[in-house]
Amino acid sequence: MTKGLDQPNGTDEGGDRHARTRAKAVAEFEGVTKLQALQRVLYRSAKQNPTRRFHALYDKLARSDVMWQAWVNVATNQGAPGIDGISIADIVDGDTQGVRQFLDGLAEELKGRTYRSKALRRVHIPKPGRPGETRPLGIPTVKDRVVMAAAKIVLEPIFEADFSPQSFGFRPKRSAHHALEVVRQAANKGGQWVLDADIKACFDEIDRDALVAQFERRVSDREMVKLLRSWLRAGIFEGGVLTDTGAGTPQGSPISPLLANIALHVLDQAWAAEGRRLGTLVRYCDDFVVLCPTKERADAARTLAAEALEPLGLRLHPEKTRVVHLRHGQEGFDFLGFHHRMVESWKFKGRFYLQKWPSGRAMASIRAKVRARTPRRLVGRDLELVVKDLNPVLRGWGAYFRHGNSARKFALIDSYVHERLAMLASKKHGLSGRRWTTRFKRQWLHDLGIYQLMGTVRYGSAHAGR
């Protein structure tokens, strides 16, 4: 008999290890349960009383279960270090003890009111599908990200009680595909005049005082309001210079999507009061469309949206905002990565239904990612390793775009991947000429283990009533 199995008191090393594991699992489960209970209480209280303002929230940020969940959320998203140069890996330092010390110290700062946010580190990332164009992001320190994530955990249930059903972006149990399904149904039911709206520099130009006013509509806790103002006024550090932008929210931080939804809730309210007669609003954070039965209503929807956004210091982009006519596939529009267009049914001639497939920008983006992972300088690397780097990119892109009419676009990307790998193989073997794919055929590609997009499409219902 194995040593230790006959010891009921569990004093053996293996028993101690399993006991510690069980105790840790129980503690984490209880922490999650308590956290969920807190969020449920906040949500129900806000839902039952739409005018209630919450005054005792700041102290909940330092709760151990809130801090731990905030850390898990931040660590899962990874991200670059802020201006202090401290990364997530530096805090972990090979074990969880470093994390515990970090969280305990941060909790003490919050309790002692000594926590101070730092400036954001400015970085510029390429815009998908737009070569040469970049988007500025402000990267908070890891410490600031954890506090922001903790604030989001506490605040989100309160504002979720107010948010409208036409808002889908960065909300629990809602996704881009839910928004896309509402678009499909609204178009198939007659909403064939579409206001394709673009808010100009939403995160950069939003009026801070207007945002705080919307925040204070539900939160009267002075410490929480002070904390929010400190994040908004933290400033941007770039090129050795610290600047205050004077407007906008910290795009790139854990709490910025929630703040954008809080501010843009005024648009949803305007729609609930006046816009329902005009058409169906579908909003994903700062990206939205309105599907209307007539051009006159679409034009009125544009006016109403502009008026609702003006108090926030926001405006519709005059060049990128347009009214599109979908009838018989005359025009299409891009929304949430897909191109949407009415297509005649192969089964019922004369009937048109909305279909969607990856937009031009989405196609350019995946091609750029494939190209970046198959350059000629990798000629000395094993193709199996190249494929290993490519597959997660293809899977991730395909998992999003497989919900639609994407078969033709998927075939194009599969062919492009085939060509890029065959070019690399030709270079590796010193073969000249352009007959890449005839030398290295599909069976060769299959044997490499490359992920194939074709055959993964999930077609939604074509009929509005289903």
Image: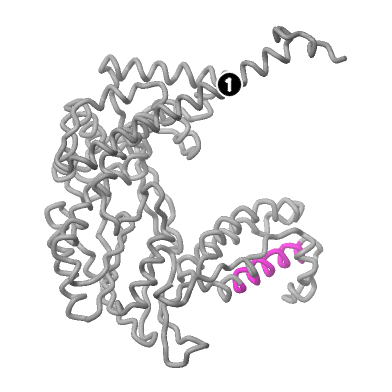
In terms of image quadrants, where is residue 319?
bottom left
In the picture, the quarter occupied by the C terminus is bottom left
Colour convention: one colour
Q: Is residue 453 magenta?
A: no
Residue at the outermost right position = 1
User: In front: 91, or 26?
Assistant: 26
Q: Is residue 419 magenta?
A: yes
Q: Determine whether, in the image, residue 450 is placed left or right of residue 275.
A: right
User: At 45% from the left edge and 76% from the top edge, which residue is drawn?
Assistant: 355
* Above/below status of 400 relative to 71: below
Q: Would you name the residue on which mark 1 appears?
A: 95
Tell me where residue 367 appears, x and y as whole percent.
Answer: 56, 65
Q: Secondary structure at mark 1?
A: loop
Secondary structure mostly seen in magenta is: helix
User: In front: 427, or 344?
Assistant: 344
Give amino acid for label 1: Asp
Specify start and end residues of the magenta stretch as a single range.
411-427
User: At 65% from the left edge and 59% from the top edge, which residue is drawn?
Assistant: 374
User: At 44% from the left edge and 68% from the top edge, which residue is drawn?
Assistant: 338
In terms of image quadrants, where is residue 449?
bottom right
Tell me where residue 35 appears, x and y as whole percent.
Answer: 39, 29
Q: Determine whether, in the image, residue 373 is placed left or right of residue 363.
A: right
Tell me where residue 265 appears, x and y as whole percent.
Answer: 22, 52
Tell me where residue 73 appears, x and y as whole percent.
Answer: 45, 36
User: At 56% from the left edge and 67% from the top edge, which residue is drawn?
Assistant: 458
Disc 1 residue crowd, few under 14, some 14–19, many 20+, Cα 10 Å: few
